Every structure is written in structure tokens, then in C-alpha cells.
Amino acid sequence: MSGHDWEQLGLWSAVLASGLYHGVNPAMGWPLAVSNGLLAHSGRAVLAALGFLAAGHALAVLAVTLPFGMLAALVAWQAQIRIGAGMLLIAGGIALLLRRGHPRALVRIAPSRLALWSFAVAIAHGAGLMLVPIYLGLCRTESEPGHQAAATLASANLGMALAVALLHTLAMFAMGGGMAWLVYRYLGLQFVSRSWFNLEAVWALSLILVGGAGARP
């Protein structure tokens, strides 16, 4: 494979890995799926809750990546856009390190509205923003700016955004669903209360790391 092919493979692997990473993080909502299943005494309730969580997460990813995709149609400024997105990601990571915990506004969202809750949490924690530098890397073109119309690039970038959101959300759904099902079926809520792991600092540092990688000229 060529160097470009290896780069593309690496970027798609990063999309997949970030989905698995978001899925295992309790802050992305899988404990709510467990709670929903236990209250309803049904495994189907766990899956239904996970579906709503995944839908909200996917919408958050699209809400962040699509505007950048439209900007990426301006190929002449693509490097500057990618660097700016990386710097924004680094700033978000630093902000999370300085201010821990969930935004208080999220407490007002009823847990029954899981899709809205998942969307708000993914936006607040920078889950969609984390994918922007990776997504812009996948949107790169080897053609000169004048060789493709902006409308063509915008259309291609829309398809790429959908593909990134789909792969990322499927990975997040699989990992978060696995965690939720293990706790619901075998481990119980005692596992969550006794073995709770806080990934806030790790999450913030990962935002800075991805942002630094994306901000490379």
C-alpha cells in the first residue's frame, strides 16, 4: 500500500478506536441503560436505551463535523481549518482539566430523554470535536483547489461525515452496550458503585493529544 493508503487506514482506525473509547466511558451514558433495564426488568429496555444514547451521540458527532466539512470545501484553506480545529480541541482539553465534573445544566435534562441527554453530554465533553481533526484528514484531496468544484467537495465531505459518524457510533454502541449488558446481566449496580472509574483527566488529556496531532502543519 502507498503512504496515502496507510494514512487513510490509520485515520479510520482512529475513528474506530475513539468510538470504543467513548463507549467504555461511563460519562457517555451506558450506566443509564443499565438503570433503565433494571427498572423495567427487561433486557430489551437496555438495548432500547442504548439505541437512544447512540442516536444522540451520532447527532452530536454530525453537528460538530458537518460545519467543518462544509468549510473543508475551501481546499485552499484546509490546512488552516485543520490546525484551527486542533487548537480548539487542545483548548477544550485544557478547560476540562481545569474544571472537572459535568456541567450543571445537564442535570436538568430528564434521564428518560436519553437521545437529548446523550447529544448534550457528547457536545459538552467534546466527543464530536475529538473527531474533527481525524475527519478533516480523511477529507483531504490530492487534487489542486481548482480541479474540483466546491459543491462536489461539500457533497463528498457530507458522505465522509456520515461514514465517520456511523463507524464511530457503531463502535461506541458495541463497547457501551457490552459494558451495560455485563453490568445488567451479571455484575449488578454494585460493580458501578464499587468499581467506578473516572476518566475525566484521561479524557481531557486525550483531547489535547488528538488536537496536537491534528494541528500539525
Image (cartoon, rainbow, N blue to C red):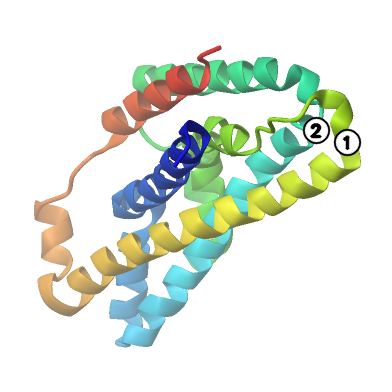
Disc assigned to residue 174: none
Q: Which element type, helix, strand or loop, lies under badge 2?
A: loop
The disc, 2 or 1, on the residue closer to the chain's N-terminal end is 2
Q: Is residue 135 left or right of residue 29?
A: right
Return the x and y of residue 212 as percentages of the image width and height.
44, 17
Give the residue at x 79% y 19%: 76
Can the viewer see residue 206 in this picture?
A: yes
Q: Please tell me which residue lies in front, 195 or 130.
A: 130
In depth, the one of 66 and 193 nearer the eye is 66
x then y, percent, for residue 27: 35, 48
Q: Mark 1 — residue?
A: 150
Q: Is residue 171 above or below residue 146?
A: below
5 to 114, vertically: above or below: above
Quarter holding the C terminus is top right
Please report contact status of discs 2 and 1: CB closer than 8 Å, yes or no.
Answer: yes
Q: Secondary structure at mark 1?
A: helix
Q: Is residue 217 left or right of residue 97?
A: right
Seen at 29% across and 53% down, the residue is 24
Vertical side of 71 occupied by 160: above or below: below
